[in-house]
Image: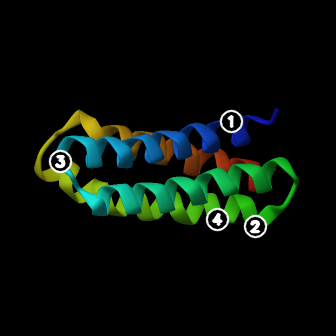
Amino acid sequence: MDFPVIVTAIFGAFVVFGGVMGYVKAQSKASLIAGSITGGLLLISAFLIAKGITAGAILGIVVSLLLIGQFGPSLRKKLKVMPNLLVVVLGLITVGTLVFSLLK
């Protein structure tokens, strides 16, 4: 299996898991919905990348950048490892991997 597929799928699974944990810990329906949608889109992205469809990489980049944009500012205000730092770091790794795969 291709490295960009693995990276994107791991990030997608992590985001879905984070949304579920946000719901379990804080009863946050918004976390559950947002985590399910964005994580699901990342998993779809991984599937499309595995099929060789370029739109999958673009989708993964866009969703990752949106997540970085959401969690980045709160990371600057308050250094919380979970979920802020992990989402930003995994998002940056995913974006870098996908951009590199597109340029290859």
Q: How many marks?
A: 4
Q: Which mark is residue 26?
A: 3
User: Does residue 76 appear left or right of residue 35 in this picture?
Assistant: left
- Three-letter residue code for mark 4: Leu
Percent of width and height locating residue 64: 50, 57
Tell me which label, 1 or 2, sits earlier in the chain: 1
- Three-letter residue code for mark 2: Ala
User: Does residue 57 appear left or right of residue 94 in this picture?
Assistant: right
Hey, which quadrant is residue 6 in on the image?
A: top right
Viewer-nearest of discs 4 and 3 = 3
Q: Which residue is mark 1?
A: 6
Tell me which label, 1 or 3, sits earlier in the chain: 1
Q: Which residue is mark 4?
A: 59
Kindly check if marks 4 and 2 are in contact, taking CB atoms under 8 A apart as contact.
yes
Q: Which residue is mark 2?
A: 55
Tell me which label, 4 or 1, sits earlier in the chain: 1
Q: CA distance from mark 3 to mark 2?
A: 35 Å
- Three-letter residue code for mark 3: Ala
